[in-house]
Amino acid sequence: MCLTAILNNITRAETVTDVTTIKGNEFEDYFLKRQQLKGICEKGFERPFPIQEESIPIALTGSDILARAKNETGKTALD
């Protein structure tokens, strides 16, 4: 299925929902590898941003993610 067809199947409400609620998770809660946690710590991240709290569990399942968040909210840290 091409990207246009996939995007057409997403409802407008799904594409404009902002993730702003903080759940209070720690990076350790995601059972990341020690090396990953070390890298996160070295980059200065102490707690996940809301976009990270929502997307890390999805990424860990191997699923693709299409996410949107405002500037300076932790998106680049997911690369």
Image (cartoon, rainbow, N blue to C red):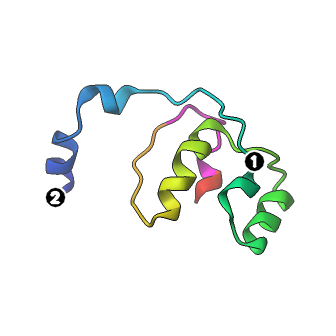
Secondary element under disc 2, as helix, strand or loop, is loop
Question: Which residue occupies 14% across, 49% down?
Answer: 5
Residue 63 placement (x, y as % from top left): 40, 61
Q: Residue at x 42, y 53 (%)?
A: 65
Screen quadrant of the C terminus:
bottom right
Q: Which numbered mark, 1 or 2, is in the foreground of this view?
A: 1
**Magenta range:** 69-76
Tell me residue 2's x, y (percent): 16, 58
What label does residue 58 carry, if any?
none
Q: Residue 2 carries which label?
A: 2
* Residue 73 relative to residue 39: left or right: left
- Name the residue at 75% across, 47% down: 26
What is the crowding at mark 1: few (fewer than 14 residues within 10 Å), some, or many (at least 20)? few
Label 1, secondary structure: give it: loop
Vertical side of 53 occupied by 70: above or below? above
Q: Mark 1 points at which residue?
A: 26
Above or below: residue 62 compared with residue 77:
below
What kind of residue is marked 2?
Answer: Cys
Q: Nearer the viewer, residue 47 or 30?
A: 30
Residue 11 in the image, given as x and y percentages of width and height: 23, 32
| Main secondary-structure element of the magenta-colored stretch | loop
Q: Quadrant of the N terminus?
A: bottom left
Crowd tier of the residue under label 2, counting other residues whose Cα lies within 10 Å: few below 14, some 14–19, many 20 or above: few
Q: Which of marks 1 and 2 is nearer the N terminus?
A: 2
Q: Residue at x 85, y 61 (%)?
A: 42
Q: In which quarter of the image is residue 40?
A: bottom right
Q: Nearer the viewer, residue 35 or 8?
A: 35
Q: Which of these two is toward me, 76 or 65? A: 65
**Image location (x, y in percent) of residue 69:** 52, 35
Q: Which amino acid type is marked by label 1?
A: Glu
Q: Is residue 70 magenta?
A: yes
How many angstroms separate mark 1 from mark 2 (CA)? 36 Å
